[in-house]
Amino acid sequence: MNRLKRLLLLEDNPDDALLIRELLQENYGSEITIDHAVSATEATQLAQQNQYDLFLVDYMLGEPPNGAEWITQTAKTITLPPIIMLTGLPDTQRVETIASTLSEVSYFVTKDHLRSGALIRAINFVQINQPTSNNIKGTILLADDDADDVMLVEDALLELKSQFRLDVVEDGVTMMDYLYRRESYSNLKGTPLPGLILLDLNMPRMDGRQVLSTIKNDPQLSRIPVVILSTSTAEQDVRDCYDLGANSFASKPATFDGLVTMMRSLTTYWFDLVTISRTQ
Amino acid sequence: MSTNERITILMADDDPDDRLLLEDALEEVHLNNQFAFVEDGVELMDYLHRRGSFSDLKGTPLPGLILLDLNMPRKDGREALKEIKADPELRRIPIVILTTSKAEEDILRTYDLGANSFIVKPVTFDKLVDIVRQLTDYWFEIVRLPGDQPS
């Protein structure tokens, strides 16, 4: 687990900035240095002068560019660290859409959730997901449109202090973009494909069965183990998935403990017990 | 998991010692399942198609899990795997490759052909028991198997 030592906070609202600093102080004390930029210009200067482990970027800044635009601009000049995007309540829907198209943004936190721990959880998760060449066992791709389920899986992995990078996609179309390293994922070109795919069956934009079939019929992707995670208990669904080439079918556990156990078993099986193809 | 106890585990391996070791390991793990053994790819296909010396099995459920060695005479595991995964009646049966080969080529190719998992045979019996325990836990407790149907 990589400790975050220095972070850049781009936030023009002084009250929000104060709250965030307090939260960070409370949780991390003197471990973290926080550089606070109130404008995009100031942030750009700081980003160029210093090395940061994390950016906390507010979407709505006093004047243009907005947070997302700043990220895109900055990506051209420096290698971006993980980014958590923040936004106030009225903008949530729109900003979520925007943030989800930016592959640089790891997490999205709404300001009304700051006090409930969402920010700290996001930061903790970023720390776990920091690839360190010596202890990262592999990447897991989770395809699930239910944000609560996604958070549960992330938390379950956190509980295990597992050494896995978790990438998340919300629908079939984004998933194929991710796997083919195109569109918003073209920055991933050349990086290894995930070692395991956890696939929810019922997602918008492209049905899980279709995605499964596409993956298993593509010689570039068919070797990646795919474990279906589904709330369905129908025999026919289980059969269909195995027929389409799923490596396994697992029923989503009803409890958090059940999910932790499942994640532990899945990661042990796929990353410790069996041998998976490493040449991606 | 009494429903899983009705599942037959089929092992295809040409080495009689390896077959015996696996049988011992399965017993060590206290599995109440039926085990069946075939010696090569030809027997394997006959068994699955309920023909030849296995025609008396017609009407009985297919195995719920196949442990498949790659290097076998008459028809090797790679060929058998290809045939099984191309057959609409048989393709859904999970196949775990259990072989001495560590070759990247084999790993890649067998996953491409539809093998559900690939495990390198361990050298010690203790390790084999360990693997068998984890393997059966996974396939019988963690994930769901496709339902068995009579053939």
Image (cartoon, coloured by chain):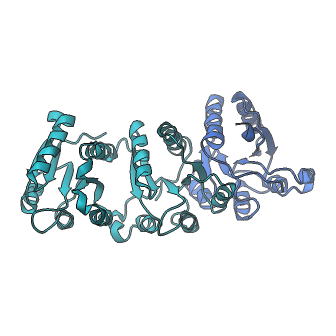
Q: Position of residue A49 (x, y in %)?
A: 8, 54
Instruction: Give the letter of the blue chain.
Output: B
Looking at the rendered structure, the number of numbered marks drawn on it comes to 0
Q: Let me know if residue B71 appears in the view.
A: yes
Residue B76 lies in what quarter of the image? bottom right
Q: Position of residue B48 (x, y in %)?
A: 81, 55
Residue name at image x 10 percent, y 60 percent = A44
Q: Position of residue A84 (x, y in %)?
A: 25, 53
Quarter of the figure with the N terminus of chain A: top left
Q: Is residue A266 left or right of residue A85?
A: right
Q: In the displayed structure, would residue A173 be above or below residue A17?
A: below
Task: Judge by depth and name the residue closer to the eye, B49 or B69.
Answer: B49
Residue B110 lies in what quarter of the image? bottom right
Q: Is residue A143 left or right of residue A250?
A: left
Q: Is residue B148 left or right of residue A239?
A: right
Task: Judge by depth and name the residue closer to the eye, A96 or A180.
Answer: A96
Instruction: Give the letter of the cyan chain.
Output: A
